[in-house]
């Protein structure tokens, strides 16, 4: 069974066309499927249109979040509701062509755990989108060791068991392949179309580039030090402690030799004390990280979203 998860926010212009094209493609596949739309607190008629569609299609489910939690939380909500052994995520603005879906599924059928879309011919602004995206993708490939051309696209197919090992938060949805590589996932890349938006404004801009850079640093830490935070903080602490101790030892020798260290080396004395203290703080942070890792919030099963309502004819049929 295939589950299609589509987060939306104010996409009333695209919803009906997306649904029509997607159902045509899915019917041709001759496989069981479900479509899950996650309305991330749209302020237009998006939810109204989806609620009407639910009344006519028992393979459609619509989740409405209480407020705008963001794309990562919306995807997480859809993943949690999905029943398929293969889960496909895609955008709701028709910048992902449903006709590319069979190519992604083909890679999953070949044995890959993730089939990731690659917008090889992007229809975006060169300065505002293309260049920052290429830089971010290059950095992410270097950090994660996964040679993908396009980490940012949402259009991906996953084996459901892979997603069970990953809990999403922040804006980490674009880095699912990198996180999944931690568990040994096999990843393939599939060229996809990148049609222009049919209406409305993009929710992305140059300002999000900085968020991506911060997320790259987060991924770097998670991939290398997730289960051993002391290795990261301990090295920093050791360096600071060592330099601080050397400075203070040097000043101590000068004091014994009769020099007035406060007057002559006041800044060095302050720097040595600060570095020594910083080293202790880093060691302590590493120890706390080791303990927190044991009780990491993901093990509690806490969700990062709140669902207002779920509409589906599946519940109605079950009650008959």
Image (cartoon, rainbow, N blue to C red):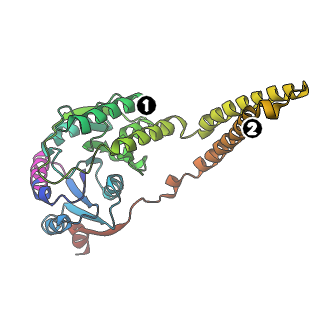
Q: Is residue 58 above or below residue 132?
A: below
The segment highlighted magenta reads 18-32
Q: Position of residue 4 (x, y in %)?
A: 23, 51
Circle 2 residues within 10 Å: few <14, some 14–19, many ≥20: some
The structure residue drawn at horizontal position 24% and vertical position 69%, both measured from the top left corner, is 311
Check contact, mark 2 vs mark 1: CB within 8 A. no
Instruction: Name the residue furthest front.
Output: 263
**Which is the main secondary structure of the residues drawn in magenta?**
helix
Circle 1 residues within 10 Å: few <14, some 14–19, many ≥20: some
Q: In this view, does 213 lie above or below 78?
A: above
Q: Where is residue 312 in the image (x, y as percent from the top left)?
A: 23, 67
The structure residue drawn at horizontal position 21% and vertical position 60%, both measured from the top left corner, is 10
Q: Nearer the viewer, residue 122 or 249?
A: 249
- Residue under pointer 1: 143
Q: Position of residue 2 (x, y in %)?
A: 24, 49
Q: Can residue 113 be seen in this view?
A: yes
Q: Which of 233 and 116 is in front in this view?
A: 233
Q: Can residue 110 be seen in this view?
A: no
Q: Which of 251 and 182 is in front in this view?
A: 251
Q: Is mark 1 on a helix, strand or loop?
A: helix
Position of 27 with respect to 224 (left or right) is left
Which picture quadrant has residue 152? top left
- Residue under pointer 2: 273
């Amino acid at each position: 069974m295939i589950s299609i998860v589509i987060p939306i926010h104010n996409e009333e212009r695209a919803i009906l066309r997306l649904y029509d094209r997607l159902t045509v493609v899915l019917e041709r596949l001759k496989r069981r499927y479900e479509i899950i739309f996650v309305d991330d607190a749209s302020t237009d008629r998006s939810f109204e249109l989806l609620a009407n569609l639910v009344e006519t299609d028992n393979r459609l489910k619509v989740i409405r979040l209480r407020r705008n939690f963001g794309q990562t939380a919306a995807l997480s909500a859809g993943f949690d509701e999905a029943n398929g052994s293969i889960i496909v995520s895609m955008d709701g603005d028709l910048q992902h062509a449903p006709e590319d879906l069979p190519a992604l599924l083909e890679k999953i059928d070949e044995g890959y755990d993730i089939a990731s879309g690659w917008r090889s011919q992007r229809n975006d602004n060169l300065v505002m989108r293309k260049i920052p995206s290429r830089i971010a993708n290059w950095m992410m490939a270097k950090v994660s060791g996964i040679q993908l051309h396009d980490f940012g696209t949402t259009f991906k197919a996953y084996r459901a068991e892979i997603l069970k090992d990953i809990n999403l938060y922040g804006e980490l949805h674009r880095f699912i392949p990198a996180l999944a590589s931690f568990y040994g996932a096999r990843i393939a890349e599939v060229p996809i179309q990148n049609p222009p938006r049919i209406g409305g404004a993009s929710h992305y801009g140059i300002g999000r580039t900085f968020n991506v850079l911060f997320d790259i640093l987060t991924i770097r830490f998670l991939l290398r030090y997730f289960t051993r935070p002391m290795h990261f903080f301990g090295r920093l602490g050791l360096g600071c402690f060592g330099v601080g101790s050397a400075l203070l030892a040097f000043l101590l020798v000068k004091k014994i030799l009769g020099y007035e260290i406060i007057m002559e080396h006041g800044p060095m004395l302050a720097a040595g004390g600060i570095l020594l203290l910083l080293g202790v703080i880093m060691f302590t942070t590493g120890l706390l990280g080791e303990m927190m890792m044991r009780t990491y919030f993901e093990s509690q099963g806490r969700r990062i979203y709140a669902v207002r309502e779920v509409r589906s004819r599946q519940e109605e049929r079950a009650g008959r």
